[in-house]
Amino acid sequence: MRTIGGQGDIMWVKICGVRTPEQAEMVCEYQPDAIGLNFYEPSPRCVSNTTAQHIAAVCVGKAELVGVFVDHSPMEIENIVRSVGLDRIQCHGNESPAALREIQKRCPDASLIRAWRMRPEGLSDLANYLAECHAADVHLSAVLIDAYVAGTYGGSGKTVAWEQLTQEYQTGDWPSLILAGGLRPDNVAEAIEAVQPWGIDTASGVEYLEGEKGVKDPERVAQFITSARQADES
């Protein structure tokens, strides 16, 4: 497992939206760096605190646990981080820099990932936001770039404009880049080559093509991680 923001050239791979201990155990067999647990209730991939604790027990020593939150209060996040034992906090809503500072204060041992939905007009809004975070003494370990789809907070299956992202993301000055948005076994290698991100994230891209959202397909999980590792080595 890699530490976000650490040194090294190995791609960090996260499988997000795991809903059951059985699914977590299966995913861990393919050795991702992290598993994402979604605590946003409207999401079809949401898990309860109790289920998250059972998943955490399965993942000990195998994968980092990243909690996905959408406009939860700092107190709610703190309670879940402590009860589940999360390693990372991924804020995917409209959290202000002030809210992130409070989360950081309450959960000093869990690093912060800020998810950002990239609009067609680019990343100028992200630049302003990161400047505000810096002024507020917020330490982000990474920024996860997802596609903007009105009314959703990830898991849409829509890809980011990779070329535009590469041109606008200020790699030398901004936190480590995690690429998300529509990544699948058949396009993840191309995405890595185009963007050269620090890490990658997928949810819907490794689920069964037909059936209930959030149910991971072992074959697609294996193909995705294998393709990502091979692309990273080339």
Image (cartoon, rainbow, N blue to C red):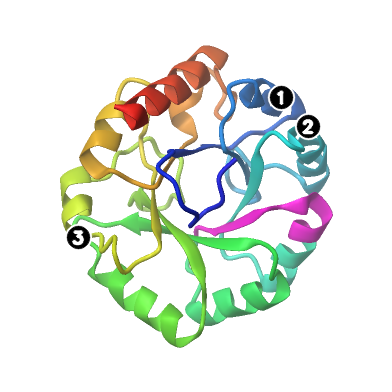
Q: Residues within 10 Å of mark 2 (few under 14, many from 20)?
A: some
Residue nearest the viewer, comparing 7 with 168: 7
Q: Quadrant of residue 171?
A: bottom left
Asked whether 81 falls inside the magenta stretch, the response is yes
Q: Is residue 232 above or below residue 209?
A: below
Asked whether 27 falls inside the magenta stretch, the response is no
The disc, 3 or 2, on the residue closer to the chain's N-terminal end is 2
Q: Position of residue 96 (x, y in %)?
A: 49, 76
Give the magenta range: 80-92
Q: Residues within 10 Å of mark 3 (few under 14, many from 20)?
A: few
Residue on which disc 2 sits: 58
Q: CA distance from mark 1 to mark 2?
A: 6 Å
Residue on which disc 1 sits: 25
**Of helix, strand and loop, which one carries label 3?**
helix
**Of helix, strand and loop, which one carries label 1?**
helix
Q: Residue at x 69, y 29 (%)?
A: 24
Callout 3 amino acid: Glu
- Quarter of the image for the N terminus: give it: top right
Q: Are dots 1 and 2 in contact, CB under 8 Å?
A: yes
Q: Is residue 191 above or below residue 140?
A: above
Q: Is residue 59 above or below residue 143?
A: above
Residue on which disc 3 sits: 168
Q: Is residue 30 above or below residue 197?
A: above
Residue nearest the viewer, comparing 22 with 48: 22
